[in-house]
Image: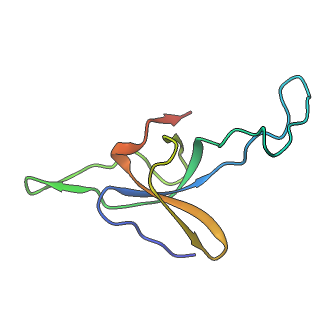
Amino acid sequence: MNIKPLGERVVIKKLEAKEKTESGILLPSQAKEKPQIAEVLAVGPGLLEDGKVVKMEVKIGDKVIFPNYSGTEVKIDGVELIIIEQSKLLAIVD
């Protein structure tokens, strides 16, 4: 897969939802929460403002939190990805 986002866009892939709770209870597929943590797969060059490129804060490999129902969902080579603007991301997870 070769994808290069434009501007301040970021390509992310959702991480899998937990299949059981911390106490060991198995969760059926309907009870699983929609994951809001994803891994950054590609980063655009940054946004051009007043003739200067604004530096991107995220980098490939970062884990980020994003809001539900945001970004554009695409499927490339059978993999579901989200293309989202960096400014829509909520946080970087260490």
Residue 55 appears in view: yes
The percent coordinates of residue 78 (x first, y second) are: 67, 73
Viewer-closest of 13 and 57: 13
At 33% from the left edge and 44% from the top edge, which residue is drawn? 87
For the C terminus, the image quarter is top right
Q: Measured along the vertical axis of the image, is residue 2 above or below residue 64?
A: below
In this rendering, position of residue 75 left or right of residue 32:
left
Residue at the far left: name it.
Answer: 50
Residue 57 appears in view: no
What colouring does the structure picture have?
rainbow
Residue at the far front: name it.
Answer: 30
At 37% from the left edge and 58% from the top edge, which residue is drawn? 9
Q: Measured along the vertical axis of the image, is residue 82 above or below residue 23?
A: below
Viewer-closest of 65 and 55: 65
At 9% from the left edge and 57% from the top edge, which residue is drawn? 51
The percent coordinates of residue 84 (x first, y second) are: 42, 54
